[in-house]
Image (spheres, rainbow, N blue to C red):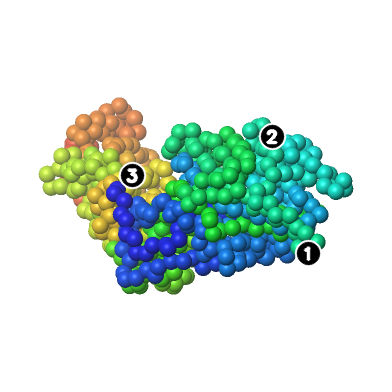
Amino acid sequence: MAKFIYLLRKITNIGAGALLLVSFLLPTLSLISHTLSVKAATGTPPPIPPNSNFDTGNHTFDRTDMANLSNWTNFGVGGASPSWSSDGWLNLINDKGTQAGGSIFDYAADFSQNVTITGAFKIDISWLYDYAAGDSLGFVLAKTDAQGMTAGQTNAGLGVVGIPDAIFAGRDFFYNNDSKYNDPNVGVRTENLILPNISNMIAIRQVSADGSSLLSPPVSASSSVNGANWKNGTILSPRNTYTDYVQLKWVPTTTGRVDAKGNVSGRLTMTYGSGSDTNGNIMGQTGQVSYDCTVAQMLSIGLIGSTGGHYSKMYYSNSGAYLNSAKATQPLRVNYINSVTGQPIESAPYSTVEANVGDRIGVVSPTNLALPADSYDYRAPNLTGYTFTGISTGSGVNTSSVAQTGSVVVNNNDPLTTTGLITPRNNSINIYYRPSTVSASFLSVYLGGTPGTTNIGSAGGVAIATPSGNPTTVGFAAPLSGIPATTGLVGLPASAPDVDIPEGYNMYGVVGPDGIAYLRSTYGTPQATLTAALNANPLTTADVTVPSGLPNSFTVILQAEQVSVMIHTRVNEEGVPEGTEIPDEQSFQLSQGLVGAPISASDISSAISTLTTGGGVLDMTSTLYNNWYIIDLVGPKNDTINTSELTDNAAAVARLTDLVNYTPYILASGLRMSIPLI
């Protein structure tokens, strides 16, 4: 489907959804948020119909997006409270130990394309020391969000150990000889003879996939580099300062190539120097390192300054910040939920919006206007057979919501939920609709080949037929009763109707709108069979296309039962002289077949032969029946042929043909013919 672009409003300062990937094993975490600088959305948003794909567009950063303070969210750990100054400096750490301060860029970058990031970091430290500034200061790249950054740690670990696959790029001020950190022995020095393991190293380091350690880096990823723009302190101003201008440049091995796991490979180069130009290039280069690695396609960008036993004032400058990158995008899912069942509407489960990480996406009711705080807004559509009731956000289903609007800030690498509504955990907006009441219809037919019917086609691959005066299958079929329609809510099964099944017949199966035959041989009883078909075919609106071509229409197929036709001899003992031998009453089968099937001439002939030959108990002409006479032949509908005037039992038995002609078909209870004897 073609993507639809509708830019209701533009963000004044749009950044690649980024996060400062930092967390610490300290008790207190504070987040200091800034409102995004945006233009208000106005007017009526476009509708977002089900089963569609939208794209907000605007997927490339302006180079100055990182320079806008409103595109960052600050955070602090252990009492740190980062704050911006009017001249664009962010004070990450204010001369305190065992703290961490940082900021998260509210957008993210697409690392399947080239990425360039430039900024300046400043150290302000007691003039007694040069590099005993803390643990780390630099950029962070990671695939998690701000909340995920709280898994990191302070002191050793550069503030990123604990965050799987995260990358730190900046100054590592302290050499840790613990094997889990794999620190290179680069730039290590001693200050004032009492502070061993201090370092002027710049490095690119990557956290292991499980987040527990730092990977062993190649030689190219670290270097001893003195601080730039150094200013020595004096007795009157006892602080040393230096300011490094830092550029991170990512070049993918193959532009646009992303593997099946969503990862890309390439080279990350970090350059230090004494200044930068308006294109983000470093001037007065003091050092450079590089690292070949594999990273997630969509990465968040952050800043981190962390301290342990050593500390200083740490700053990041936003005034000359530069970013050249495609924006990271994520799919936002709009779910259309039945407010009665809490399940996605079958014909309209969801739509997607490809949106920039960090953008605020909203959905409003069918009658609401756009929300000024949102980056892009869409309007809940009117759905045939449903009435809009409310909106909620996230993966949780809230069918009682009556909210007329809902907005989410698009998260980076937002995972799908694994239970309940399968949808992105954060990047989801749910629109609720109450279903209308509709009716289900039922057609009663016979199984093809039923005696007395003519085939009319098939349903669910099963031949079906109806009673006919000129049937293609010889016999007689009981008239079919109509089945009353039932009602229910769209998305729920219809209530089961009462089905009048003629005597001698049973339910063969039910074919639903899905074109599937649900058979009684599978479900056991007519009621269970009907219930299975109804449950498998919740009610829909009339415009829904179904395999059978008939929404909410069910075909109930009946079949004739197999029965036997019996002949019984009946003895009238009234007035029989004492001492007369009374024969036992007898029964035998005249015919067998489906209800409604004709009794064949051969069956009649065989029965007559049985009743007149053989000399046994069934031979009405044998000596057992001397002085006993057949007086009547009685049919199942009490049709009677009087044979009392015939003194020859064989002649009376021969009238069986005439009796069958009264009822030539097998009846439901079996054709019970009786032969009274006196």
Q: Which residue is mark 2?
A: 216
In the image, farthest residue toward the left = 470
Report helix, strand or loop for mark 1.
loop
Image coordinates of residue 58 in percent, x first then y, are: 38, 54
Image coordinates of residue 8 in percent, x first then y, are: 34, 64
Which one is nearer the viewer's eye here, 67 or 535?
67
Q: Residue at x 44, y 69 (%)?
A: 373
Which one is nearer the viewer's eye here, 49 or 100?
100
Name which residue type carries label 2.
Answer: Ser
In the image, farthest residue toward the top = 614
Name which residue type carries label 3.
Answer: Ala
Q: CA distance from mark 3 to mark 2?
A: 63 Å
Disc 3 crowd, CA 10 A, few/some/many (<14, 14-19, 20+)? many
Q: Nearer the viewer, mark 3 or mark 1?
A: 1
Q: Would you say residue 496 is visible in this rendering?
A: no
Q: Which residue is mark 3?
A: 517
Q: Which residue is mark 1?
A: 236
Rendered image quadrant of residue 341: bottom left
Which one is nearer the viewer's eye here, 562 or 56?
56
Q: Is residue 197 above or below residue 424?
A: above
Which one is nearer the viewer's eye here, 336 or 162?
162
Q: Is residue 63 above or below residue 495?
A: above
Do callouts 3 and 1 mark residues in contact (Cβ within 8 Å)? no
Q: Quadrant of the C terminus?
A: top left
Of pointers 3 and 2, the one earlier in the residue sequence: 2
Image coordinates of residue 135 in percent, x first then y, are: 74, 50
Name which residue type carries label 1.
Answer: Leu
Of pointers 3 and 1, the one earlier in the residue sequence: 1
